[in-house]
Image: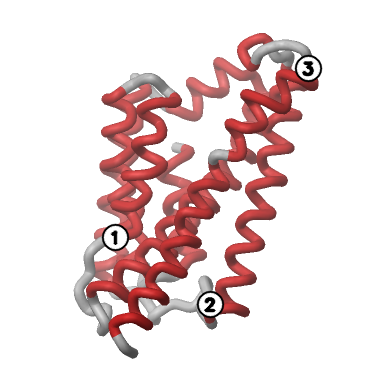
Amino acid sequence: MTEIQRNGKGWNFFSYALIAFAGLGIELILAIFLEPAMYGCAMNEWSTWQNISHWVMTCICWGLVCFFLIRTSKHKYGFDVFAYEGKMKGWQWCAILAIFVVMLIVSYIDWSGSKVLKELQYNGWLKFIFQYIYYVFEVGLVVLVVVFGQKAFEIWFHKDCRVRIPYGGILVGLTWGLAHVFTKGSLSAGLLLILTSVGYGVTYLLVNRDVKKTYFWILLMFVL
């Protein structure tokens, strides 16, 4: 593969990572422009069912983006998102569990308690259930940013892919993480999410690029 071909192929996957990140931004379009016009009120004035409707529409959009990226990356570029490198070794399982425990501790400190219990108390059962369905789809796009970002940077910098740097997680931090600085209005929350995102990238490498295992662990880290 020539340098020009390598750069072009890398950009193809990098663009898919950016599309996955842009897919997350669909929610802002719905919440800021479309739904206020539909409901006649701002987001902070929505009823329970209007919030649920928002999450359902967002999940549908996110699901379509995930389907598009997974399908076209395989048919257009021959990249099977679900392919992986083999079985995990014992030290990899230990490392994953260590990262998971650290994430739980960080979440507990950040929320001043259990995130699950806090959100259940704030939302009530009905909104809680739909919000966590929403998280299921959100994590799907985050995982795809990790996967395509990792692929792009390894094409550019490491032809044999033996150098394990969590490029995908770093890219998630610089996109999704920094975006939270502006949407949440909190620098500390954004910086914490950037560090967490790097952990997601490390997780992807530790599970030998198995997207199913990556999704499972990142979902647990995110929701708990």
Q: Position of residue 2 (x, y in %)?
A: 31, 88
Q: Quadrant of the C terminus?
A: top left
Residue closest to the eye, 40 or 190 = 40
Q: Which mark is residue 178?
A: none
Return the residue nearer the eye: 125 or 161.
161
| Residue under the point 63% across and 54% down | 65
Q: Amino acid at mark 3?
A: Tyr
- The label shown at residue 39 is 3
- In the image, what residue occupies the spot 38% across and 61% down? 149
Mark count: 3
Residue at 31%, 64% (x, y): give it: 93
Q: Nearer the viewer, residue 83 or 107?
A: 83
Counting residues from the start of the chain, the first of labels 2 and 1 encountered is: 2
Of residue 211 and residue 186, the one placed in the foreground of this image is 186
For label 3, the SS is: helix
Q: From what the image shows, is residue 12 above or below residue 96? A: below
Vertical position of residue 75 compared to residue 204: above or below:
below
Residue 167 at x, y percent in the picture: 29, 60
Q: CA distance from mark 3 to mark 2?
A: 41 Å
**Which label is found at residue 80?**
2
Label 2 secondary element? loop
Residue 19 located left or right of residue 55: left
Q: In this figure, which residue is indicated by the disc labeled 1?
A: 167
Earlier in the chain: of badge 3 and badge 2, it is 3
Q: Quadrant of residue 126?
A: top right
For disc 3, the neighbor class at 10 Å (few under 14, some 14 to 19, many from 20) is: few
State left or right for residue 215 relative to residue 190. Answer: right
Measure the C-alpha gap from mark 2 to mark 1: 19 Å
